[in-house]
Image (spheres, rainbow, N blue to C red):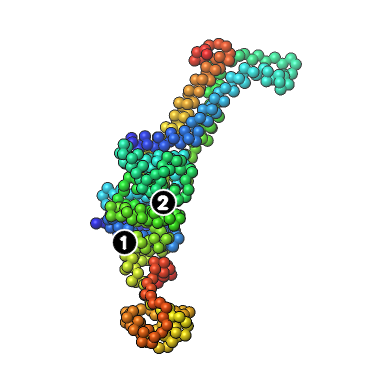
Amino acid sequence: MKQFSTLLLKEWRENLRNFKIFWIPVVFILLGVTEPLSNYYLPQILDATGGLPDGAVIELPDPEPEQLLVAVMGQFQLIGMLVLVLAYMGSIAGERRNGTATLLYVRPLSYVSYFLSKWLMASIVAVFFGGLLLHGCAVFSGSVRGVPGVCGDV
Amino acid sequence: MNVLEVRSLTKRFGTEQAVDGLGFELAEGSATALIGPNGAGKTTTLSMLAGLLEASAGEIQRKKNLSIGFLPQYPRFFPWLSALEFTEMAAKLSGVDSRKARQQAERTLGFVGLGQVANKKISGFSGGMKQRLGLAQAMVHQPSLLLLDEPISSLDPTGRREVMELLKSLLGQTTILYSTHILNDAEEMTDQLLFLQNGRLVEHGSLNQVRSRYADPQIRIRFENTNAAERFMRESPWPAAVQGTAVIVPVKVEGPIMQDVFRFLSVKSLPVVGVEQETASLEDIFLKVVAGK
């Protein structure tokens, strides 16, 4: 347990000091914000890019907050997952390759706690910080439409 | 009392025999120098002893509850940690009590001369500072055996001296096994020499034992001019070789000893500048061992 908390502290410091803890949520914010905005401004976007041919009629119902949330989740699952994979891939292999792991491996280290410390830290960044922002996005998407959002009006 | 005993230790990488039937013992509190040309298997041996590599065959017998500190040849650190944070982490991972870890880390950093920069990020450290930090992380948990792979080779002469003094002060309570290329320094801190070549132990023993085996002591007599040297050659009863204005007389068991040489020189009243007995330095021995005697 002491080993695990020591390793987790190391992971925390790494994520804090290479700014992963900030830029990963920011990517998620941008992803989440663009979805309702692009929905809301879709008619203007279509006009600006030349509009629809005469006579074409497309009904664009304003999406409900719930629908937006589902769409944002879809974005997160695709691009958000890719971001997380890119940010955390090779974090064990990388330490082994560049030799920093040597100074850990010479100690009576439990591989389980070594792996778990990395996994838990990545999860915290993804779920906790990502989740906090998802909440923010949900509130935001509701307020853009002027109706009470999923998580209450702002 | 031996801290570590190694018997017919072998490591193969594919068909390559990196270490071949190595056997030696480390007495408690002693310093052992691992010497050999590049590629002799020094690093592989140390890695096996540190438990980083699995031996292909053979046996490593450690004393019960032996704690080991290891310094790799090129230690790599997490650049985003400070020296103190890293050393403290190393202490905790080695089982030092959490409350004592920081204190012990601070003391160790001071000991290796990094007290001033303990709170600086490692990313800004020079090579020499990293080497010292490597030493700090190896000894922060006060291990009874230190395995050091080239601990001084990358340091400047001042740093080398300081680190050697520091290591010497640890001897007694700590057993040290280190590999090195700097033979002058090895000469100064060694109870046992292990010469490796092509993965095999080609020579071992104390410095004096090895020296006596390879020494070929000789007396070098320097004269004022070559005439005197040549006269010595003609008239002396010993086999000698001229080297400029000097004469080299090999010292065999039945050969001349200093007093005889002095007597001969004064009887003949040759213009002598200096007489000295030369023994082989570790470097000479190294070259001889590597060349196969």
In this view, the residue in front, B64 or B270, is B270
Residue B19 at what x, y percent from top left? 39, 59
The quadrant holding residue B4 is bottom left
Q: Are marks 1 and 2 on the same chain?
A: yes
Residue B212 in view, yes or no: yes
Q: CA distance from mark 1 to mark 2?
A: 22 Å
Location of residue A4 with respect to B277 vertically, above or below: above
Q: Are marks 1 and 2 in contact (CB under 8 Å)?
A: no
| Residue highlighted by disc 2 | B72
Crowding at dot 2, Cα within 10 Å, few <14 / some 14-19 / many 20+, comes out as: many
* Quadrant of the snapshot with the N terminus of chain A: top left
- The disc at residue B82 is none
Label 2's element?
A: loop
Residue B194 in view, yes or no: no
Furthest-right residue in view?
A: A54
Location of residue A84 with respect to B183 vertically, above or below: above
In this view, the residue in front, A151 or B161, is B161
Task: Say what amino acid the circle numbered 1 marks.
Answer: Asp
Residue B273 at what x, y percent from top left? 42, 78
In this view, the residue in front, B169 or A41, is B169
Residue B231 at what x, y percent from top left? 43, 87
- The disc at residue B191 is 1
